[in-house]
């Protein structure tokens, strides 16, 4: 039986990562959990995010997931301080695969990082990058409006361009930019346009999917059941936006994990 892969995010942005994993490992079952009840994590304290990580990872383990993918930068930034996680065969976060890819590219001398307040204030990207490449000039910028804007479906219009412009004009000239939030792949084209295609953009989905491929032992197994998508709070708008993030329509199920 194929090992199921548990993927979670604060909401539905992590579906960009789940979609890349599904394409890379079509025979593995994915169980997705979007904590829409507590969205956004970017504004929450690390103590509370750690509590959510513990509950969701225990749920996914109980659902027979043996690989865990933390498809949220805000959650990944506090993951190392979570004690007593279930015994997954592998735990993949969305930060290390991207940091490794950027650090390996010796042509990059300066890099910008954008993300939620939680991710940027944690300094997780800059600390990891500095460890690997002390010569890098690193600039971090919190862009808290971007995730809610994307959730509202504002992805390819004048407002999107304007908000991107307001934020990114604050960055000095960089060779590369890390999109440190799983929502941002949806506005990659607009970000690329802001830089006239002259800045290399790095985001998580494909790099994380490749990392997960390396973690699973059986690649040619036969899937035994369908993928499953849970959310902790379900509204029509989540169902609609999920399609935007995943590429096609999916059925969201309401989980009572956080019900009293
Ligand atoms: N998907 C989350 C991330 O990658 C952003 C949304 C949130 O703050 O919860 O950080």
Image (cartoon, rainbow, N blue to C red):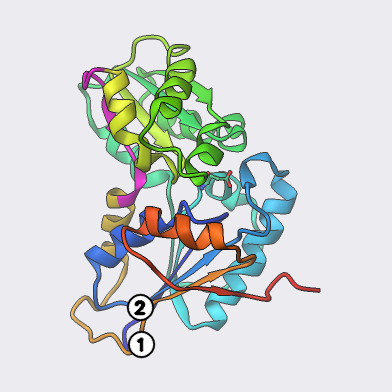
The residue indicated by pointer 1 is: 225
In the rendering, at what x and y percent does residue 49 appear?
Answer: 67, 52
Residue at horizontal 44 percent and vertical 27 percent from the top: 113
Q: Nearer the viewer, residue 9 or 149?
A: 149
Q: Is residue 161 left or right of residue 88?
A: left
Across and down, in percent, residue 102 comes to 30, 33
Judge whether 164 appears above or below 188 on screen.
above
What residue is pinned by disc 2?
29
Depth order, front residue of 160/222: 160
Q: Secondary structure at mark 2?
A: loop
Total numbered circles? 2
**Marks 1 and 2: in contact by CB < 8 Å?**
yes
- Is 203 magenta? The answer is yes
Ligand 1 lies in which image quarter?
A: top right
Mark 1 secondary-structure assignment: loop
Q: Quadrant of the C terminus?
A: bottom right
């Amino acid at each position: 039986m194929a090992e199921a892969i548990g993927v979670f995010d604060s909401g539905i942005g992590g579906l960009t990562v789940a979609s890349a994993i599904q394409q890379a490992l079509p025979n593995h079952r994915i169980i997705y959990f979007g904590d829409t009840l507590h969205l956004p994590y970017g504004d929450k304290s690390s103590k509370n995010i750690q509590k959510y990580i513990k509950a969701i990872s225990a749920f996914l383990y109980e659902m027979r997931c043996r690989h865990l993918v933390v498809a949220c930068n805000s959650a990944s930034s506090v993951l190392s301080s979570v004690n007593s996680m279930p015994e997954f065969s592998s735990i993949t976060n969305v930060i290390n695969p991207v940091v490794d890819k950027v650090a390996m590219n010796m042509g990059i001398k300066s890099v910008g990082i954008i993300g939620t307040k939680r991710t940027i204030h944690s300094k997780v990207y800059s600390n990891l990058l500095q460890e690997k490449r002390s010569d890098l000039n690193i600039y971090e910028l919190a862009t808290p409006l971007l995730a809610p804007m994307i959730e509202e479906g504002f992805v390819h219009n004048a407002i999107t361009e304007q908000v991107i412009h307001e934020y990114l004009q604050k960055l000095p000239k960089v060779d590369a930019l890390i999109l440190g939030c799983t929502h941002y792949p949806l506005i990659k084209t607009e970000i690329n346009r802001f830089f006239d295609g002259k800045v290399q953009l790095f985001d998580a989905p494909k790099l994380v999917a490749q990392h997960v491929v390396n973690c699973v032992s059986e690649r040619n197994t036969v899937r035994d059941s369908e993928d499953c998508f849970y959310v902790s709070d379900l509204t029509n708008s989540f169902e609609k936006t999920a399609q935007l993030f995943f590429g096609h329509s999916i059925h969201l199920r309401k989980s009572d994990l956080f019900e009293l």
